[in-house]
Image (cartoon, rainbow, N blue to C red):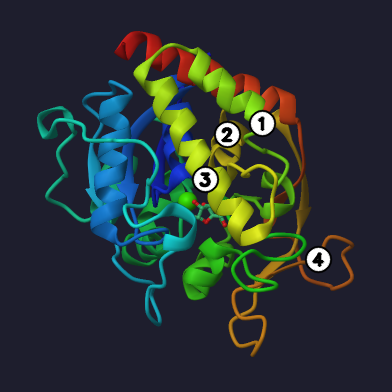
């Protein structure tokens, strides 16, 4: 079966870092390009981190472009309490600059457009951060829509939030962008906290990364060790949930998540609920479905996918 062409838009971010490895390491995907957005950290840091992870994974020749440095409306509030000052605190990631992919001298939106327009097959856009770049792409280049196979995004929740009581970070950071995407009429898959909170990097997972005997495995172990401390301190979680790789896994192995086609709205004006994803799971409104929302995850299959990809990349990169 032909590898599926994908673009990953991300804000690395510990879980974005693992997602990039899965996207680059699984042969079912053809990673056309990586774009970065401000979110977990400022744009300069998320861009540097994406480049670092691709270099560590020994992935060459993939274009990287930086996108928006703030949400469409309002100010950027980063997640330094979760991802640290660098956005990838924990391991020593001083990759020699020479080995890092260069940053394209075009905006992420233009790289996305060029890659989609140049692809012989429709492209799946996988968004792992605030949806600012994706919303701008749809508004700046509406012609792109017909060449997009699907937008799959990690964000929102059918339950409660993580950044506000009812708001998940990627949506809360840029609610207007999420609203543009969810109203686009395009095929959309939403991978929310309700499933990603099941993908926990347990001590066994961390030991498995460490046991790979590769630099990449060791970096993943150190990333998850830092991430575990952050989630313990901030949320009392015993182990950290790796949100973003679940969105990648849902593209390369769709049966790994069970989804429901339901209406999803973004709260834009609620005093206490701005940025909440209002998911009508039981169809109590007359609204037509606009997204396939993940409601269950095959956790064991997910970890097998991710560990296989990291092991393969690590062995090749040394
Ligand atoms: O709420 C979790 C999401 O926000 C993840 O994508 C994480 O990397 C942050 O971007
Ligand atoms: Ca992210």
Packing grade of label 1 (10 A; few <14, some 14-19, many >=20) is few
Cα distance in 3D space between marks 3 and 4? 32 Å
Q: In the rendered image, which residue does mark 2 sit on?
A: 251
Please identify the quadrant where the C terminus is shown: top left
Image-based side of 302 in relation to 260, left or right = left
Residue under the image location 58 percent in, 21 percent down: 207
Looking at the image, residue 258 lies above or below residue 185:
above
Image location of residue 131, percent across then percent down:
46, 61
Cα distance in 3D space between marks 4 and 2? 23 Å
Q: What is the quadrant of residue 150 in the picture?
A: top right
Q: What is the quadrant of residue 60 in the picture?
A: top left
For the residues labelled 1 and 2, say whether their Cβ atoms are less than 8 Å apart. yes
Q: In the rendered image, which residue does mark 1 sit on?
A: 254
Looking at the image, residue 239 lies above or below residue 134:
above
Packing grade of label 4 (10 A; few <14, some 14-19, many >=20) is some
Packing grade of label 3 (10 A; few <14, some 14-19, many >=20) is many
Q: In the rendered image, which residue does mark 4 sit on?
A: 280
Image-based side of 262 in relation to 162, left or right = right
The residue nearer to you, when weighing 49 against 91, is 91
Cα distance in 3D space between marks 1 and 3? 27 Å
User: Mark 3 or mark 4: which comes first in sequence?
Assistant: 3
Q: In the rendered image, which residue does mark 3 sit on?
A: 227
Callout 4: helix, strand or loop? loop
């Amino acid at each position: 079966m032909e590898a599926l062409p994908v673009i990953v838009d991300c804000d690395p971010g510990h879980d974005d870092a693992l997602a990039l490895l899965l996207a680059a390491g699984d042969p079912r995907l053809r990673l056309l390009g990586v774009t970065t957005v401000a979110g977990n950290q400022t744009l300069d840091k998320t861009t540097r981190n994406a480049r670092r992870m691709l270099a560590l994974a020994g992935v060459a020749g993939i274009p990287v472009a930086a996108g928006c440095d703030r949400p469409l409306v309002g100010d950027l509030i980063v997640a330094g309490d979760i991802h640290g000052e660098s956005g990838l605190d924990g391991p020593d990631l001083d990759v020699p600059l020479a080995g890092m992919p260069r940053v394209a001298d075009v905006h992420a939106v233009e790289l996305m457009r060029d890659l989609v327009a140049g692809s012989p097959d429709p492209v799946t856009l996988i968004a792992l951060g605030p949806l600012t770049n994706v919303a701008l792409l749809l508004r700046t280049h509406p012609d792109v829509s017909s060449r997009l196979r699907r937008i799959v995004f990690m964000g929102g929740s059918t339950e409660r939030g993580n950044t506000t009581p009812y708001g998940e970070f990627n949506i809360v950071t840029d609610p207007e962008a999420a609203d543009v995407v969810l109203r686009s009429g395009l095929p959309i898959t939403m991978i929310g906290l309700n499933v990603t909170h099941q993908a926990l990097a347990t001590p066994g997972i961390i030991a498995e990364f460490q046991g790979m005997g590769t630099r990449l495995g060791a970096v993943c172990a150190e990333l998850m060790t830092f991430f575990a401390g952050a989630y313990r301190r901030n949320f009392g979680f015993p182990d950290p949930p790796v949100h973003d790789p679940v969105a990648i896994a849902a593209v390369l192995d769709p049966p790994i998540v069970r989804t429901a086609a339901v209406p999803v709205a973004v709260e834009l004006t609620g005093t206490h609920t701005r940025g909440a994803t209002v998911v009508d799971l039981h169809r109590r409104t007359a609204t037509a479905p606009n997204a396939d929302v993940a409601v269950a995850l095959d956790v064991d299959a997910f970890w097998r996918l991710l560990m296989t990809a990291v092991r393969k990349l690590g062995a090749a990169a040394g």
